[in-house]
Amino acid sequence: MDPAWLAAAVFLLLWQCAGCTRAGKEWTYAGAVGQSEWSEFFPECGGFSQSPIDVDTSRTLHDPSLAPVQPLGYGQYGHEPFTLSNNGHTVEMPLPSWMGVAGLPWQYSAVQLHLHWGNGIGVATGSEHTIDGQGASAELHVVHYNSELFANMSQAKTQGNGLAVLGVLIEAGSETNHAYAQIFNYLGRIRYAGQRVAIPAFDVQTLLPRDLSRYFRYNGSLTTPPCYQSVLWTVFAEKVKISHYQLLKLETVLYSSRSTAPTEPIPMQDNYRATQPLNHRPVLSSFIPVSVKIYTDGEISAIVIGSLCGCIGLAVIVWFVVKTIRSTSSWDVLPSVRPPPQSRTKDVAKNLKQDMALKTTSDLGKKEEAAPQPEP
Ligand SMILES: *[C@@H]1O[C@H](CO)[C@@H](O)[C@H](O)[C@H]1NC(C)=O
Ligand SMILES: *[C@@H]1O[C@H](CO)[C@@H](O)[C@H](O)[C@H]1NC(C)=O
């Protein structure tokens, strides 16, 4: 074969491959490179230890050795402002490397935090992790890399035990969350992908729930492509509340498209991944979870009807007992008052004949002949 042709073929192949990785990088949550297609472009997304997961508290393993999570330096934010950016998939805030987390098997250094949310229609959709099948409205992720084993994030993110992410489920309530307001107040400045804004630094720990001792722990992955299976997950049991207005703002202010895009701006919504199969991975809990079973409407009516029947039954029994006690004196004379037994069997026979009369005429005769004659 002509070496020139070979070179051309190799060049074409390489060029095509560059094209396919370029296309692969433009992933989205829905559409052509939506989450069900991620594994075609990013093979690790089809792995067996993917995140997020549904935490089934009836199957979690209580591990009393799991110590409370200790944020390190989250409150030492210095004088430098933080930077908030719209990366086309989420709102992201890099964290200074002196922040970290202890209480995990290694020392981890903070990298960034970001959020996932829904579209303002479903109340319990938007979070990535779910607990006993119940989602929350949004989820905060604080990403760390293992600074004991690795030099930096880019080295750690592909390796086992490389990353540790803290997951916080967020639900909507009536009160404004002033910690989250420190991020949400600036979303209007980064509406389009690629935009960034400097914001006053603040105590990052205020974004976490108060109780850092109750959490679920498992080995999983990044929840966005390339889905590296390098994450030790901590999902806190306590949820954080933001106001309905704050949630609405998060769900509606940002676009996943650039300001220069020729098309209509694309709202940044539903940027959460569906829960992935657990595939026999253990999920540890630092506490003994109380399974809060959520009943369906049918189950609730069954319970109500059941209890009602139970109450009526109890009332009948009580009434009968009271009546019996009251008539104890007449109880002794009851046998003599009781009608003779044969008249009762006659009644039964009469009833039986009436029943037979209701049957179809064709087998009426036969049935009446065959009807057992009551003993006198
Ligand atoms: C990460 O660390 C490796 C190994 O020390 C180094 O080669 C690489 O340049 C570093 N990357 C970044 C982004 O700092
Ligand atoms: C996560 O995987 C490591 C091995 O890579 C293992 O030692 C550790 O026990 C696992 N942790 C959990 C919570 O399953």
Image: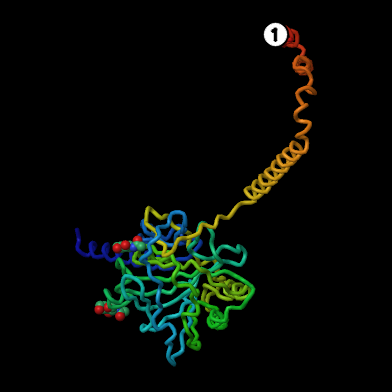
Which residue is the site of mark 1?
370
Residue 58 appears left or right of 67: right
Residue situated in front as seen by the camera: 49 or 356? 356
Tell me which corner region of the image, top left, top right, bottom left or bottom right, holds residue 253.
bottom right
Quadrant assignment for ligand 1? bottom left
Horizontal and vertical percent position of residue 54: 47, 58
**Rendered-image quadrant of the N terminus:** bottom left
Which kind of residue does numbered mark 1 sit on? Answer: Ala
Which residue is located at x 46 percent, y 59 percent?
55
Tell me which corner region of the image, top left, top right, bottom left or bottom right, holds residue 213.
bottom left
Residue situated in front as seen by the camera: 309 or 47? 309
Above or below: residue 78 compared with residue 112: below
Horizontal and vertical percent position of residue 247: 59, 72
Residue 321 appears left or right of 234: right
Which residue is located at x 22 percent, y 65 percent?
4
Q: Is residue 32 visible?
A: no
- Label 1, secondary structure: give it: helix
Is the image coloured rainbow, by chain, by secondary structure, or in one colour?
A: rainbow
Q: Is residue 329 visible?
A: yes
